Amino acid sequence: MHIKDAFEIRDVEAAREIVRAHPFATLVTEDLRATHMPTLVDDDARGLAIVGHVARADPVADSLSGPLLAIFHGPHGYVSASWYASETIPTWNHVTLHIHGTPERFDDAMPVLRRTVEHFEAVVEEPWSLDRLGETAREMADQVVAFRLDAESWHAEAKLSQDKPADERARVLAGFERPGPYANPRLAAAMRGFGA
């Protein structure tokens, strides 16, 4: 991924926050097989690491012994050239993270499945639990492959008009905050978080 210096995220905690806020990853294998699955930050890792799972029947599962790219798309949206005071071209603002590594497959998927369900159910008024399924949960766990991906390298970008003058950034921010087809409160919040 090509990243201009002005947009590069170098802080590992900021990268973890991208995963936490946007956990649905695109996983791409060395042989260009791809799938889309929820992941979690592995908070026990010293660096950047994620855990996740794929269906055993998914062709990606067969390729989890080789290099893997996990792509996370944060908020993103179209920036109309009409939002600028000066003459320029339209662009796309976005927050994106790529994690490269070789995954470690787990023999037992149940701990990752349990952790995933507990994580996403934690905000539900009456959280659901895998325990409700009894032995069926174990049968389901046998149908998936769980993995951990430690980042051998990672690249993150927050292209949020930081290369524009303050008045132009304010106009872009207003474009995302006003009602209309390109209203994008999450992208506006990301811009504010990065100093717009």
Image (cartoon, rainbow, N blue to C red):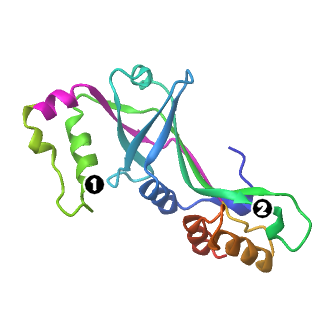
**Which residue is rendered at x = 47% and y = 43% of the image?**
25
Tell me the quadrant of the picture where the C terminus can be found. Answer: bottom right
Residue 134 vertical placement versus 43 (above, below): above
Q: Quadrant of residue 54?
A: top left
For this orientation, the residue located farthest to the left is 134
- Which residue position holds label 1? 119
175 vs 15, nearest the viewer: 175
- x 8%, y 32%: residue: 135
Which numbered dot is residue 18? none
Percent of width and height locating residue 114: 21, 44
Q: Residue furthest right?
A: 87
Give the percent coordinates (x, y) of residue 28: 53, 31
Q: State the image coordinates of residue 52 (x, y, percent, origin top left).
A: 35, 40
How far from the left and from the top, in percent, is residue 2?
72, 46
Of the residues under marks 1 and 2, which one precedes in the sequence?
2
Q: Which residue is mark 2?
A: 80
Residue visible at 20% across and 30% down? 140
Hey, which quadrant is residue 92 in on the image?
bottom right
Q: Is residue 99 above or below residue 63?
A: below
In this picture, residue 89 sits left or right of residue 154: right
Q: Residues within 10 Å of mark 1 (few under 14, many from 20)?
A: few
Region rendered in magenta: 136-158
The amino acid beneath tag 2 is: Ser
Name which residue type carries label 1. Answer: His
Estimate the spatial distance between the alpha carbons at disc 1 and disc 2, rounded to whole Å.
37 Å
Foreground tag (1 vs 2): 2
Say few, some or many: other residues with alpha carbon within 10 Å of mark 2 (under 14 / 14 to 19 / 20 or more). Answer: some
Label 2: which secondary element:
loop
Whether residue 135 is in magenta: the answer is no
Q: Which element is circle 1 on? A: helix
